[in-house]
Amino acid sequence: MEPKNQYEKEYSFEFFPPRSAEAEELLVNTSDMLAALNPLFFSVTFGADGTSRDKTRETVMNLKVRTGIESAPHISCIGSTRENIRGIIEDYRIQGIRRIVCLRGDMPSGMMDVGEFRYANELVEFIRQETGSYFHIEVAAYPEMHPQAPNIEADFQNFKRKIDAGANGAITQYFYNADAYFRFRDACDKSGIDVPITPGIMPIGNFFQISRFSEACGAEIPRWMRKRFEYFGDDRESVHSLSVELISGLCQRLLDNDVPGLHFYTMNRSHLVRRIWDNLDLK
Ligand SMILES: Cc1cc2nc3c(=O)[nH]c(=O)nc-3n(C[C@H](O)[C@H](O)[C@H](O)COP(=O)(O)OP(=O)(O)OC[C@H]3O[C@@H](n4cnc5c(N)ncnc54)[C@H](O)[C@@H]3O)c2cc1C
């Protein structure tokens, strides 16, 4: 396959709201370091438990003011009413936020009421109804299938609903198998989806943590890769070097095959992202 070159590459970095003074300081250092790479935007996650809604807003505003980089809040709709969401988007509009990441989110355990939105496509549709084309809306994509979907085709059709509802682009769940991304992108091409699908990249800082998380979110860690990480056990330095080597290889393969850019799940740390970045041919 001849590499295509459709996109000017754009880069973005994702953070979560810090929960302590120490974590806040870490995020300041991380975001300052990553701002120097001149990304298109930062994004900040939104907890489904409701407690971090204000923290998402506060983190977004701090990032925007301190670094001057466009900062995008994630908005999840599960458990929310139309009135809640209306208030949130109106507030962001007043604050001059133009880019948002729209998600369904996950129900916190013990919570029974899904609220007035069942799926992310309904959230996108509502925001478009309320605010027209004001916001640039990103949604989530799952090249290896969302874990609750009945099958890959149904999941793909559900993804398409979000684009049809007016999303401008998608960021994928992280993956370690580039072919899963290419298959997903081919499916998009075939069904006329022409928005950028940006790969989400998760550097591996703690293999056992990522391994547990991957089982829950349906991201596959190939056996050969698992074996290589397991071999290093708790040897952090070797795990990090292997992570930098493998993730740099994954990113370079994606970049050589016309991805629109890369979105890094930073876990509020810059050291691995920086080492990966330095390995890439980003001209
Ligand atoms: C880039 C990215 C950022 C994220 N950020 C956050 C965050 O900040 N906060 C957070 O809590 N979580 C976040 N998540 C996780 C996400 O909230 C979960 O994966 C959640 O389970 C699904 O959210 P969604 O927006 O993809 O849901 P949806 O697109 O609504 O899909 C959820 C499930 O429902 C199915 N489905 C969708 N629409 C329909 C329909 N109309 N009818 C029937 N079935 C349907 C889908 O196939 C899928 O199985 C993020 C994920 C990604 C990839």
Image (tube, helix red, strand yellow):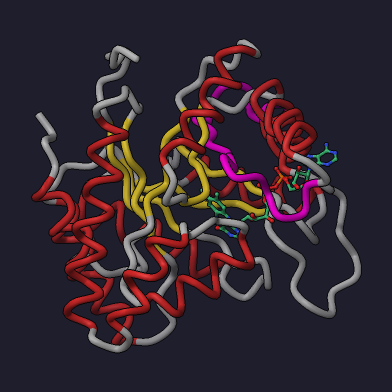
Position in image of residue 203 (x %, y %): 32, 61
**Can residue 20 be seen in the rendering of this structure?**
yes
Q: Is residue 177 left or right of residue 116?
A: left
**Can residue 130 be seen in the rendering of this structure?**
no
Q: Return the residue nearer the eye: 171 or 127.
A: 171
Which quadrant of the view contains residue 114?
Answer: bottom right
**The C terminus, quarter of image:** top left
- The verdict on residue 22 being magenta is no
Position in image of residue 139 (x %, y %): 58, 39
Q: Return the residue nearer the eye: 160 or 73.
A: 160
Q: Is residue 82 above or below residue 233?
A: above
- The verdict on residue 146 being magenta is yes
**The N terminus, quarter of image:** top left
Q: Residue at x 47, y 29 (%)?
A: 182
Q: Is residue 177 above or below residue 10?
A: below
Q: Residue at x 45, y 71 (%)?
A: 210
Which quadrant of the view contains residue 27?
Answer: bottom left
Q: Is residue 260 left or right of residue 129?
A: left
Q: Which residues are magenta?
A: 128-149
Q: Residue at x 28, y 39 (%)?
A: 11
How many numbered circles does the render carry? 0
Q: Return the residue nearer the eye: 39 or 179.
A: 179
Position in image of residue 84 (x %, y %): 74, 55
Q: Residue at x 58, y 39 (%)?
A: 141
Position in image of residue 24 (x %, y %): 31, 78
